[in-house]
Amino acid sequence: MSEAITSDFLMKTPFHARTAPLCLSGKWGRWAGYSSVDCFYSVTEEYFAVRTAASLFDMSPMIKYRVTGRDAARFVNRLITRDIGACPPGHGLYVCWCDGDGKLIEDGTVFRLAENDFQINTAEHNFCWFEDTALGLDVTIADVSEEFAALALQGPLSRLVLERLGLTGIEAMPYFGLAWFTLDEAPLLVSRTGFTGDLGYELWIEPGRAEMLWDRLMAAGKDYRLTPIGAAALEMVRIEAGLIEIGFDYIGAEAALRESRKRSPYELGLGWLVDLKKSYFVGKRALAEEKRRGGPRWRLVGLEIEGNKPAIESFIYRGRTEVGHVTSAMWSPTLKKNIAIAVLEAPYATPKADLWAEIWHPRELEIRKINAPCRVVRRPFYDPPRRKA
Amino acid sequence: MKRYDAIVIGAGHNGLTAAAYLARAGKSVVVLERRPVIGGAAVSEELYPGFTYSSCSYVSSLMRPEIMRGLDLPRYGLQIIPYEGILTILPDGDYLASYSDPDLTRRENLRHSKRDAEAFGRFSLEVLRQCRFIKPMLLMTPPDPTSFKLDDIRGLIWMGRKFADLSERQMYDVMRFWTMSCADFLDEYFESEAVKGQLAGSSIIGTALGPRSPGSAYILLHHYMGEVDGDIGAWGYARGGMGAISRALAGAAQAHDCEIRTEAEVSQIIVKGGKAVGVALADGEEVYGTAIVSNLDPKRTFLKLMPLEHLDDTFIDQVRNFKIRGSSGKLNIALDGWPEFIAKPPIPAPLYSSIQIHRTLDDLERAYDDWKNGMWSRHPYLDIVIPSGLDPTMAPPGKHYMSVFVQYVPPKLKDGPWDDAKRSAFADTVIDTLAEICPNIRDLILHMQVRSPWDLENEVGLTEGNIFQGELTLDQLMFNRPFPGYAQYRGPLRRLYMCGSCTHPGGGVMGAPGANAAREILKDFKRRILR
Ligand SMILES: Cc1cc2nc3c(=O)[nH]c(=O)nc-3n(C[C@H](O)[C@H](O)[C@H](O)COP(=O)(O)OP(=O)(O)OC[C@H]3O[C@@H](n4cnc5c(N)ncnc54)[C@H](O)[C@@H]3O)c2cc1C
């Protein structure tokens, strides 16, 4: 194979020159066509940096859209199930959007940069869907994914790192707030958002200044154990935070091959994002009808499972009847508990249900089947007050 | 007057564990602590502005995950941050690091011995087997050997098969392991002094045994049988210092209306009609309760708090003969910056681990000889950690907290009692030793707390400063702990219970003695022996 092909096969993020030498484990993954670090040195170390100190995650491969024009707010309100009116300029919102049948396409964040200027951050490509939704409106939708490098700075000491960086006023920034700063003459957007369920921020900068941002942050974080982390540690904290992930906990309606695999927001525990009082949004009629009929068949829940063997891909039973399955599972080092996100048939999605998980656990090449009692619990599993404080 | 279901004497972590379990079961509980702070030897203190010292115990592994989960301790702020392993620094700047990754560890050992690189795997597997045998017994009340023939080796073999999938031959190894010396055990596996020295550290910490004393192999095991998140043998820092464990336990107890009183020293256990019925405090106040639970070591409980006329002579002899010998000291140091060590491992993780100065088995044995002669070791064994490296909340930004555990230090010196001059001479020995691997240490010291066994006894209330509330030798373990006939947490009088580290499964910040004691007490409530 020619060299040109191998070197261009996966794209490099704007932080690659910084992350690559630190990736001692050699564990890389792929994310939207980019190489992305899975683990730098030890997942455990990286996990604990998020939960006890400060962590840095390169999230540049995230897909970002810029929506502008006279009707931009109208467009967003037509797209999402929440009311964008509740989000003044300078704030962000966690949202989801559905197809006309009320099936979830994706969940993500929307930043309201100005009255009619938005940034929408997603994991999947949504350009066609957004353009279709914009039919008849005066808006411009642009894929600006490559115009921003992005870092997630998360953990209980993350605020101290930004103070040390010299971002004045950062301590007053509210949960889901946005703020603009200038760092070394480069415009820097900071949002108080994240995928960890902890105190944290996301930082957005032009790609040409990415390395400068990385270096400045690492210097500012020296005394706070600021640790670069990979996707493996992030996956752990997002499960503890009870956050769902497309491709793991659900299949987006635009990607599902089988009709029965599509899910409504109500099925995924996102009912709180659906505002049926809004005059219109895509999928409203179907969702109102679903609600009227008493809700959908499935419910996404948090489970606490006995023992310490993660219930990966386990089936959940009540008595001898299979009533659901696990979508994400882990041993939580912070809670010292075996936790999982699962999809259950609605009548069993209650703390009162007497459930058990069938866990297949390899023990020196011998697979053991464990029937572990489990119970439905509130998500997030872990929710420190500092997340919003 | 209020009568509690249970009075716990001492707010050490085991007293708090027992109290939390009792309170959760709906019992009315009061904990009476002599000091202004709770936690006993599991405590965090700010003795110099901005610095948090784990002034006694400093690292966690033994704390049972079942207890953390059962009492929901993370909800009350408990987080344990694991670290990598051990870094031994040799005098010439070479080093031996152990990592969580077995391949990295093998490569390290290979630099010191070709054989030991592989023997390390064998050794670890054997220790793991031993741990798997012990693990189910930790949260179990030791069987009474008079009703269960545990002295019969067949009984043990049965337990080994059942709990740990061990063969008969492996069970004989268990017996050997519990009685042999650490040096003999290590000699069976290793040839390199660096490797043996690194592993031997765990066999002498806190004990008045040398590496060549029979029984010291068990001490090593005692330090390996803990875990962090299922990783057996791993150690970590409690975020915010070891006091975070005690605070979380207190939080769990208080959530169920347990009262915790500090500066409430118990001066006597009140006995009426052959039963323990309450306690008298130093200021004369009397507190009454149904179960009286002592978190103190047996010498304190029975020789200081209990009117002797209520105990028979044989029992008093057992108490007197209980081995509780102090052998450890400690320095807590506030540092102005990160200390530079002469060893420079390419990966920083080992520097955040437990750092030791290289000692051969012979060095350690000679250090022990000094102790026998009534002086602190001239070339002591040091276990050094810098918790602020992984937990920046322990010190102001850029500054660091260093804990230096010192073995061996006698509670009584041959040339007279501990005083300020001796304490400072002892500190000099330790700092001189430290300077061998960390040349700039002296320039960095902002504040230092020096603790001899005498200080530990007088401040924390551990007799002779013995960190385990009693030596961990087979004659004082399992159904012999603290004494034969009294291993099931019940004292010699009715309604009197013991829940400290002096009971099974012993010392360390483990919570198991407290949890086991609470279980037995609740059993007695259920059987209406207590009411
Ligand atoms: C220097 C040092 C280092 C150590 N390092 C470690 C380590 O790193 N890791 C580890 O796992 N273990 C370590 N240990 C061992 C561990 O800390 C102890 O074994 C454990 O904390 C003992 O707990 P406990 O609850 O059984 O008793 P204690 O902690 O001894 O609690 C007894 C309590 O009773 C109180 N008390 C005493 N007399 C009275 C009275 N008359 N009235 C009321 N209250 C009274 C005391 O003040 C104290 O609070 C260390 C110990 C020491 C001393």
Image (cartoon, coloured by chain):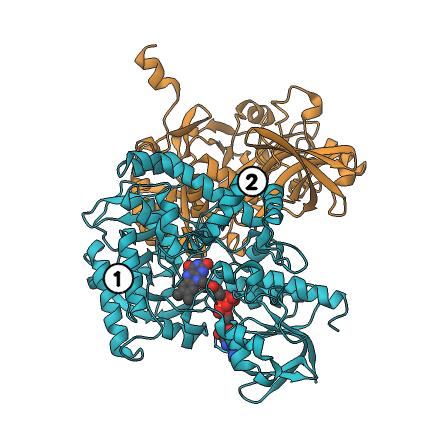
Image label count: 2
Q: Residue type at mark 2?
A: Glu
Q: Which chain appears cyan?
A: B
Q: Chain of mark 2?
A: B
Q: Quadrant of the N terminus of chain B?
A: bottom right
Q: Earlier in the sequence, mark 2 or mark 1?
A: 2
Q: Quadrant of the C terminus of chain B?
A: bottom right
Determine which residue is flagged by label 2.
B168
**Residue A302 spot, x, y in % from top left:** 65, 43
- Report the front residue among A268 and A85: A268
**Residue B372 spot, x, y in % from top left:** 32, 67
**Residue B73 spot, x, y in % from top left:** 57, 57
Determine which residue is flagged by label 1.
B336
Q: Which chain appears orange?
A: A
Direction top: furthest residue: A1
Residue B113, by quadrant, is top left
